[in-house]
Amino acid sequence: MLTSFPWYDLPSVQWANDSLWRATGYPGELNRQLAAADLWQDPGLLVSQACGLDLFLSNAPIEPIAAPVFDLDCTPGMYYSYIVGDLKGQTAAVNSLSSRSGWSALLSMCNPKNVVVTGSHQASIKALKSGKVDVAAIDAVTWRILARDTPESVAGLEIVGRSSEAMAPPYVGKLGAEHETLFQSLHQAFGSPGSSTAKAALLIGDIIPVQRQHYLPILTEYRSVTNEASLKGQFVFSRL
């Protein structure tokens, strides 16, 4: 049985993810050795996390189970990104080309010509601080955790905009499996009074049930902004 909570598993809050997993009552520990994409393909997968776009752009046999309700000023079950740097900047850092928070959200507000794929929001922030790029879209939850726990990591950077809301990255399970018991265990763990400190650390108040159809607007947005951007000219891509 493989389990992971990789999406917001920053060093300062790994203890919180561990605590929430233990509260589910399931045995074992969260896997931090395998990449999320490898976990999604493993027949032993029980639960992991993904971007909403991964439900459509990857070939992973996964389906959404629940969406986190973040402590953000938006609709419950939704999230958004901060645009950091120069809105008119020509060189952008992007964590992944299948990321709503880092890619689609960016293109909905900016028109960069050069795109540096960094591999993570943290790496995009470092690229901004080093001056290698001009702008990036950073998941608001990631930004707030970093700003709270390691303020030096975002010091000197300016939030210049905020993307529209979208369904929050889901907890996912194996496609076609029975997930009701898992959802109830997760819901009980997140609702436990003993989990309040861990939830606060992760900026999560609760979870809600979701289905693939709830993420279709993210796919529609992705197709719209990537098509519009491609019509304006070919991007120049590079990697850190």
Image (cartoon, rainbow, N blue to C red):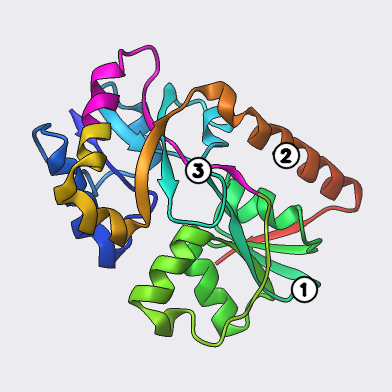
Give the residue pinned by disc 2: 221
Q: For mark 2, does the 10 Å Cα neighbourhood hold few (<14), some (14 to 19), or many (20 or more) residues?
A: some
Give the residue pinned by disc 1: 89
Q: Which residues are magenta?
A: 165-186
Q: Which mark is residue 159?
A: none
Q: Amino acid at mark 3?
A: Pro
Q: Is residue 229 magenta?
A: no
- In three-dimensional space, the C-alpha distance between marks 2 and 3, rounded to whole angstroms, equals 20 Å
**Who's the residue at 43% across and 80% down the image?**
153
Give the residue pinned by disc 3: 76
Q: Is residue 152 above or below residue 220?
A: below
Give the structural element (helix, strand or loop) at label 1. Answer: loop
Rendered location of residue 174, percent (x, y): 35, 21
Q: For mark 1, does the 10 Å Cα neighbourhood hold few (<14), some (14 to 19), or many (20 or more) residues?
A: some
Give the structural element (helix, strand or loop) at label 3. Answer: loop
Quarter the N terminus occupies: top left
Q: Give the mark nearest the N terminus, 1 or 2.
A: 1
Q: Amino acid at mark 1?
A: Gly
- In three-dimensional space, the C-alpha distance between marks 3 and 1, rounded to whole angstroms, equals 32 Å
Q: Is residue 120 visible?
A: no
